[in-house]
Image (spheres, rainbow, N blue to C red):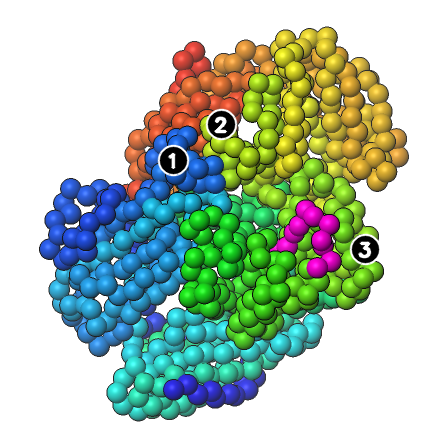
Amino acid sequence: MMKKIQFVASLFLLSFLMVNGVSAQTKKKVGFERNQKFNADWKFALGDSPENSSVNFDDKNWRELDLPHDWSIEGKSEKDNPSGGDGGFYPMGTAWYRKTFSVPAEWKNQKIAIYFEGVYMNAEVFVNGKSVGMQPYGYTSFEYDLTSYLKFGQQNTIAVKVDNSQQKNCRWYSGSGIYRNVWLMVRNPIHIKQWGVAITTPKVTNEKATVQVKTMVKNDTETLQTMTFSTTISIKKVNGSKTISMSTDNGLGIDLKAGEEKEIVQNIEIENPILWSPETPDLYTAEIKIMKAGKIKDGDLPVDVVTKQFGIRTIEFSAEKGFVLNGKKTLLNGGCVHHDNGALGAAAYDRAEVRKVELLKKAGFNAVRTSHNPPSEAFLDACDRLGMLVIDEAFDGWKEKKTIYDYASIFDKWWKHDVESMVLRDRNHPSIIMWSIGNEIIERAKSEAVETAKMLASAVRNLDATRPVTSAMTTWTKDWEIFDPLMAAHDVAGYNYQLHRAESDHTRVPSRVIVQTESYPKDAFANWNLVQKHNYIIGDFVWTAMDYLGESGIGRYVYPGEPAGEHWEGNLYPWHGAYCGDVDLTGWRKPISHYRSMLYNNAEKLYMAVREPNPESGQIKLTSWAVWPTWESWTWPGHEGKNIEVEVYSKYPKVRLYLNNKVIGEKETGLSQEFKATFIIPYIAGELKAVGLENDKEAETTILKTAQQTAKIKLSADRNEIAADGQDLSYIAVDITDEEGNIDPNAENQLTFKISGAGVIAGVDNANLKDTDLYMANKRKAWKGKALLIVKSTKDRGEIAIEVSSPALTKGKIKIKSVK
């Protein structure tokens, strides 16, 4: 039974306090850790046996590891693996995880649950030998109540079977295993339900905002309970050191019958709200607390406390005004991303997820589409904190399959559970501005698809009516208008690769709001131009923002002698990933990234790169998602005296090019030139310099120098201090340089990595998606003069010494710290 009660609270400003200075009463916690990270000390084994779930099973020979874990990335990419090009040719299969843990006797009167943020896929969970549930879809977070299965005051065993053996079940690299965080949840029988807090901002002005907090409280006891309920809201500004703390009036009394669920609705007014945006991602924190009724004495602990971060912001979508954020028209410079983390595979370490968002921000994106599944919680938290708008997507398809074992096989039974899980889990993130219910649905031309879309959209709106519903649609036939009824079932129409139809569509359906949910990288300017010209086109999401594993060969350029054709037309091994991203797997921004960012942003105004010349044996050919291979290089041995093309991207009216301090020429780089100039010049080693001209005066310079003979290895860490928690990461960039420090863009030296101290190797990479050497290893070849080493902390604090060596090169050495 569920009831709803409602009250209005006026918030008053208590004081400006340091972040830890909120009153003692609001900071008191329950007498145990409510959410306990459960990643450590698991046992793992490949293969399958029904005995693996038994309490008495002997797992002493199983491998010991901490989560998150992806066993597929540890294996070898091989041409005939059943996952095929879609899965990067990686091994999948079935495996088990086991963990023995103690449950204190004092927890006997608590409710104990296990929460998995993501397991790929078909996860069945056993506790003390008994099955407690099955979750097929590998991207859905899920929870099981373990209370009735546990032995309190004793050791307990949890076992998880993960079955990813049915291939193919995905069109990109999924990874295999418990690849996201796991939590043990210890709650009072009277508690706030998991995903039971929903925070919205129904009314927002510069002077005042109404924050609505809906909280679902459950009484799992057998008697009537009288409780008090209160909420405290605070904010620490991104650009300030102070926290503003505000509180509702304490002591709201609520009665909960035995077994009852009750929704408490609070409408809280905040004076002079601080608005969340990509430029100012300020987050409020709501601390929601349940206390036993009666006189509260100092030292009394709450029955339950939940904290949720949220942002105050407004979003509007219309054909007349476009996408309006906090009253300001905002263009979406978006990119699609898959969930993998390159050399780490699918393992969603918190730091890896944060770094991904940092790279996207640095590349100039202000929006991301989580294609084609809900992302990790850490990823969305990072989008909130760093300021990245999000289209949160449920799945790739509906009832008709794209691969033999994909989501279509479970759609009818699981769609409602999985869609509701996504919305309930993610609805408090201010970064999320749209929900996507699908991608390029196979049955899109059928009338049943319209009914399915309405069903899915209704399920989303029943839980969150504050954001529009979209999905990504496409066709490469002439039958585009037949999708009008399907698009009408959405609030925003998602176009994959079809933005050229938008102007005629607007004439036919003037009310339609359009976003290009996928686009070819090569069409960056044309898409930007359409977004600039028309309010009803709210943005463009390129496929893709970052390179990824699987969908092997998409975005490739084809050298003479290599097999022609698109990625779906044949087995392109050793390609095992996608090269269509603006950012590669090491985090390096390709030239197209600088160009796209320049179109939408003013953070950079000048960039230069050189188009790779055709080899003597023939011409380079491009596939649909490819752009010409273009590099930050003026080192082209063997091309002396031969013409070579230099590209300069510029937001200045003109650019001037110098070679060895001699002027080569000037060219305009305005709108009519698409902010781009190409110079064709004979290659001569030395220094190439491009200069942006403002009022015919040199305003900015960028330089490329010819590298001399490779001499040394240079290392640089993205973070010199990491947490000693066995989870934190430092990304070490490896550059092969000459004596003067110039990167040799042709270096492909074999590198050996050595680590000592409080760290281990988590992965090695070089961004070359035709190099099938292991990602989890201590050796890797450089590519284009670069490589990447990912270092993971142990649980010990201390120094981590990193050494990278290669024959005939001076070793690269660096030290970082692991701290508590």
Q: Earlier in the sequence, mark 2 or mark 1?
A: 1
Classify residue 140 as left or right of residue 438: left
Q: How many marks?
A: 3
Q: Report x, y in % for residue 799.
A: 33, 36
In the depicted structure, whether residue 46 falls above or below residue 280: above
**Quarter occupied by the N terminus:** bottom left
Q: Earlier in the sequence, mark 3 or mark 2?
A: 3
Residue 458 visible at all: yes
Q: CA distance from mark 1 to mark 3?
A: 45 Å
Please say if the residues under marks 3 and 2 sit with CB atoms less than 8 Å apart: no
Q: Which residues are magenta?
A: 472-482
Look at label 3 and name its amino acid. Ser
- Name the residue beneath numbered marker 1: 81
Residue appearing at x 51%, y 56% in the figure: 400
In the depicted structure, whether residue 73 falls above or below residue 677: below
The disc placed on residue 770 is: 2
Residue appearing at x 65%, y 51% in the figure: 474
Q: Report x, y in % for residue 767.
A: 51, 31
Judged by its main secondary structure, the magenta piece is loop
Q: Report x, y in % for residue 138.
A: 40, 54
Classify residue 147 as left or right of residue 19: left
- Name the residue beneath numbered marker 3: 504
Residue 295 visible at all: no
Classify residue 403 as left or right of residue 44: right
